[in-house]
Image: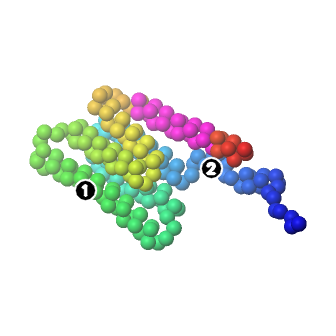
Amino acid sequence: MPEELTLTPAADAASTTSQPSLLRRLFRLRDVGFYLMIALAWFGAVYTDTDAHASRWYWHGLIPVFGLICIITQWPHVETAKARALLVFQQFLHWGGLLLLMQLVFIATTQGFMDTLDDRQASFLLMLNVTLTTFLAGIYFNWRLCIVALFLGAGAVFMVLMQNIAPMLVYAGIAAIVIYLLWSWLYSRWQARQAAK
Protein backbone atom coordinates (compact mmCIF):
# COMPACT_ATOMS: atom_id res chain seq x y z
CA MET A 1 0.00 0.00 0.00
CA PRO A 2 1.62 3.31 -1.06
CA GLU A 3 2.17 5.94 1.59
CA GLU A 4 0.19 9.14 1.36
CA LEU A 5 1.85 12.50 1.73
CA THR A 6 0.37 14.55 4.54
CA LEU A 7 1.01 18.09 5.65
CA THR A 8 2.92 18.07 8.90
CA PRO A 9 2.55 20.72 11.60
CA ALA A 10 6.15 21.83 10.95
CA ALA A 11 5.31 22.63 7.33
CA ASP A 12 2.14 24.35 8.51
CA ALA A 13 4.13 26.51 10.91
CA ALA A 14 6.60 27.39 8.17
CA SER A 15 3.80 28.60 5.91
CA THR A 16 2.32 30.86 8.60
CA THR A 17 5.68 32.41 9.46
CA SER A 18 6.13 33.52 5.86
CA GLN A 19 3.25 35.99 6.21
CA PRO A 20 4.38 39.62 6.55
CA SER A 21 4.02 41.36 9.89
CA LEU A 22 0.94 43.39 10.76
CA LEU A 23 2.91 46.63 10.35
CA ARG A 24 3.91 45.63 6.82
CA ARG A 25 0.35 44.61 5.97
CA LEU A 26 -1.01 47.97 7.20
CA PHE A 27 1.55 50.04 5.33
CA ARG A 28 1.62 48.33 1.96
CA LEU A 29 2.22 50.51 -1.08
CA ARG A 30 -1.47 50.73 -1.88
CA ASP A 31 -2.26 51.73 1.72
CA VAL A 32 0.46 54.40 1.84
CA GLY A 33 -1.09 55.94 -1.27
CA PHE A 34 -4.47 55.89 0.46
CA TYR A 35 -3.06 57.66 3.55
CA LEU A 36 -1.29 60.21 1.35
CA MET A 37 -4.54 60.99 -0.48
CA ILE A 38 -6.35 61.57 2.82
CA ALA A 39 -3.53 63.85 4.02
CA LEU A 40 -3.62 65.81 0.75
CA ALA A 41 -7.41 66.07 1.02
CA TRP A 42 -7.06 67.44 4.59
CA PHE A 43 -4.61 70.04 3.49
CA GLY A 44 -6.75 71.00 0.50
CA ALA A 45 -9.91 71.42 2.56
CA VAL A 46 -8.12 73.54 5.17
CA TYR A 47 -6.35 75.57 2.49
CA THR A 48 -9.65 76.16 0.67
CA ASP A 49 -11.21 77.37 3.90
CA THR A 50 -8.41 79.85 4.53
CA ASP A 51 -7.74 81.08 0.97
CA ALA A 52 -10.44 80.08 -1.50
CA HIS A 53 -8.94 81.90 -4.49
CA ALA A 54 -5.41 80.50 -4.22
CA SER A 55 -6.68 77.01 -3.39
CA ARG A 56 -7.94 76.57 -6.93
CA TRP A 57 -4.37 76.01 -8.05
CA TYR A 58 -3.93 73.42 -5.32
CA TRP A 59 -6.89 71.40 -6.60
CA HIS A 60 -5.58 71.66 -10.16
CA GLY A 61 -2.21 70.29 -9.02
CA LEU A 62 -3.80 67.59 -6.90
CA ILE A 63 -5.49 65.87 -9.85
CA PRO A 64 -2.27 64.55 -11.49
CA VAL A 65 -1.04 63.45 -8.06
CA PHE A 66 -4.24 61.46 -7.43
CA GLY A 67 -3.97 59.92 -10.90
CA LEU A 68 -0.34 58.94 -10.29
CA ILE A 69 -1.21 57.39 -6.92
CA CYS A 70 -3.97 55.36 -8.59
CA ILE A 71 -1.54 54.09 -11.24
CA ILE A 72 1.15 53.21 -8.68
CA THR A 73 -1.26 51.35 -6.39
CA GLN A 74 -2.79 49.35 -9.25
CA TRP A 75 0.48 48.65 -11.11
CA PRO A 76 1.47 45.47 -9.18
CA HIS A 77 -1.94 43.90 -9.90
CA VAL A 78 -1.58 44.27 -13.68
CA GLU A 79 0.63 41.66 -15.32
CA THR A 80 0.96 42.31 -19.05
CA ALA A 81 2.41 45.35 -20.79
CA LYS A 82 -0.83 45.80 -22.74
CA ALA A 83 -2.90 45.80 -19.53
CA ARG A 84 -0.51 48.30 -17.93
CA ALA A 85 -0.75 50.59 -20.94
CA LEU A 86 -4.54 50.32 -20.71
CA LEU A 87 -4.40 51.15 -16.99
CA VAL A 88 -2.33 54.30 -17.65
CA PHE A 89 -4.64 55.30 -20.51
CA GLN A 90 -7.80 54.80 -18.39
CA GLN A 91 -6.37 56.80 -15.51
CA PHE A 92 -5.24 59.53 -17.90
CA LEU A 93 -8.75 59.80 -19.34
CA HIS A 94 -10.42 59.60 -15.92
CA TRP A 95 -8.35 62.26 -14.17
CA GLY A 96 -7.68 64.25 -17.35
CA GLY A 97 -11.42 64.70 -17.83
CA LEU A 98 -11.68 66.15 -14.35
CA LEU A 99 -8.71 68.44 -14.97
CA LEU A 100 -10.34 69.71 -18.15
CA LEU A 101 -13.63 70.34 -16.34
CA MET A 102 -11.84 72.19 -13.55
CA GLN A 103 -9.98 74.31 -16.10
CA LEU A 104 -13.28 75.22 -17.78
CA VAL A 105 -14.78 76.27 -14.43
CA PHE A 106 -11.65 78.27 -13.65
CA ILE A 107 -11.73 80.06 -17.03
CA ALA A 108 -15.46 80.74 -16.77
CA THR A 109 -15.17 82.29 -13.30
CA THR A 110 -12.02 84.34 -13.96
CA GLN A 111 -12.97 85.64 -17.42
CA GLY A 112 -16.34 86.94 -16.27
CA PHE A 113 -18.54 84.32 -17.97
CA MET A 114 -19.98 83.25 -14.62
CA ASP A 115 -20.11 86.28 -12.34
CA THR A 116 -22.57 84.55 -10.05
CA LEU A 117 -19.84 82.37 -8.46
CA ASP A 118 -17.46 83.91 -5.96
CA ASP A 119 -14.12 82.31 -5.02
CA ARG A 120 -15.57 80.23 -2.20
CA GLN A 121 -18.41 78.87 -4.35
CA ALA A 122 -16.05 78.06 -7.23
CA SER A 123 -13.69 76.25 -4.82
CA PHE A 124 -16.65 74.33 -3.42
CA LEU A 125 -17.64 73.32 -6.95
CA LEU A 126 -14.07 72.17 -7.67
CA MET A 127 -13.99 70.15 -4.44
CA LEU A 128 -17.26 68.46 -5.38
CA ASN A 129 -15.87 67.57 -8.80
CA VAL A 130 -12.76 66.05 -7.21
CA THR A 131 -15.00 64.17 -4.77
CA LEU A 132 -17.15 62.68 -7.52
CA THR A 133 -14.17 61.69 -9.66
CA THR A 134 -12.41 60.10 -6.69
CA PHE A 135 -15.57 58.19 -5.76
CA LEU A 136 -15.95 56.88 -9.32
CA ALA A 137 -12.28 55.82 -9.29
CA GLY A 138 -13.06 53.94 -6.07
CA ILE A 139 -15.91 52.09 -7.75
CA TYR A 140 -13.87 51.10 -10.79
CA PHE A 141 -10.34 50.73 -9.44
CA ASN A 142 -9.97 50.47 -5.65
CA TRP A 143 -12.62 50.77 -2.93
CA ARG A 144 -10.23 52.75 -0.69
CA LEU A 145 -10.72 55.74 -2.98
CA CYS A 146 -14.40 55.79 -1.97
CA ILE A 147 -13.26 56.50 1.61
CA VAL A 148 -11.08 59.37 0.36
CA ALA A 149 -14.09 60.67 -1.61
CA LEU A 150 -16.32 60.52 1.46
CA PHE A 151 -13.75 62.53 3.38
CA LEU A 152 -13.48 65.08 0.54
CA GLY A 153 -17.26 65.40 0.37
CA ALA A 154 -17.53 65.86 4.12
CA GLY A 155 -14.81 68.51 3.96
CA ALA A 156 -16.69 70.37 1.21
CA VAL A 157 -19.95 70.29 3.17
CA PHE A 158 -18.27 71.38 6.41
CA MET A 159 -16.54 74.19 4.50
CA VAL A 160 -19.95 75.52 3.53
CA LEU A 161 -21.57 75.03 6.93
CA MET A 162 -18.80 76.41 9.14
CA GLN A 163 -16.00 78.90 8.73
CA ASN A 164 -13.39 77.49 11.12
CA ILE A 165 -13.30 73.79 10.32
CA ALA A 166 -9.57 73.11 10.30
CA PRO A 167 -9.50 71.33 13.70
CA MET A 168 -12.62 69.34 12.83
CA LEU A 169 -11.08 68.19 9.53
CA VAL A 170 -7.91 67.12 11.29
CA TYR A 171 -9.89 65.13 13.85
CA ALA A 172 -12.08 63.56 11.15
CA GLY A 173 -9.03 62.58 9.12
CA ILE A 174 -7.27 61.10 12.14
CA ALA A 175 -10.46 59.22 13.01
CA ALA A 176 -10.71 57.85 9.45
CA ILE A 177 -7.13 56.57 9.55
CA VAL A 178 -7.54 55.10 13.05
CA ILE A 179 -10.76 53.34 12.05
CA TYR A 180 -9.10 51.94 8.93
CA LEU A 181 -6.03 50.75 10.87
CA LEU A 182 -8.23 49.16 13.53
CA TRP A 183 -10.37 47.46 10.89
CA SER A 184 -7.25 46.15 9.10
CA TRP A 185 -5.82 44.85 12.36
CA LEU A 186 -9.07 43.12 13.38
CA TYR A 187 -9.52 41.68 9.89
CA SER A 188 -5.97 40.29 9.84
CA ARG A 189 -6.53 38.69 13.25
CA TRP A 190 -9.78 37.19 12.00
CA GLN A 191 -7.99 35.82 8.92
CA ALA A 192 -5.28 34.32 11.14
CA ARG A 193 -7.93 32.62 13.30
CA GLN A 194 -9.68 31.27 10.22
CA ALA A 195 -6.39 29.92 8.85
CA ALA A 196 -5.63 28.25 12.19
CA LYS A 197 -8.90 26.30 12.16
Residue that numbered label 2 is attached to: 24
Q: Position of residue 125 (x, y in %)?
A: 25, 42
User: Quick one: label 2, few (<14), some, or many (20+) residues within 10 Å?
Assistant: few
Residue 38 placement, left or right of 187 = left
Return the residue nearer the eye: 93 or 53: 93
Q: Residue furthest toward the front?
A: 1
Assess whether residue 42 is covered by the magenta stretch: no
Picture residue at 48% right of the left edge, 36% below the top = 176
For the record, the magenta segment spans: 168-188
Amino acid marked by disc 1:
Leu
Front residue of 4/82: it is 4
Left/right placement of residue 22 relative to residue 47 reads right
Question: What residue did someone put label 1 on?
Answer: 100
Q: Residue at x 41, y 45 (%)?
A: 146
Which comes sooner in the sequence, label 2 or label 1? Answer: 2
Residue at the limit of the structure toward the right, as seen here: 1
Disc 2/disc 1 C-alpha distance (Å):
38 Å
Q: Splitting the image into 4 quarters, where does residue 91 fall?
A: bottom left
Label 1 SS: helix
The answer to whether residue 43 shows anywhere in this view is no
Q: Is residue 162 visible?
A: yes
Q: Name the secondary structure under disc 2.
A: helix
Give percent across and percent down for residue 13: 78, 52
In this rendering, is residue 2 above or below 186?
Answer: below
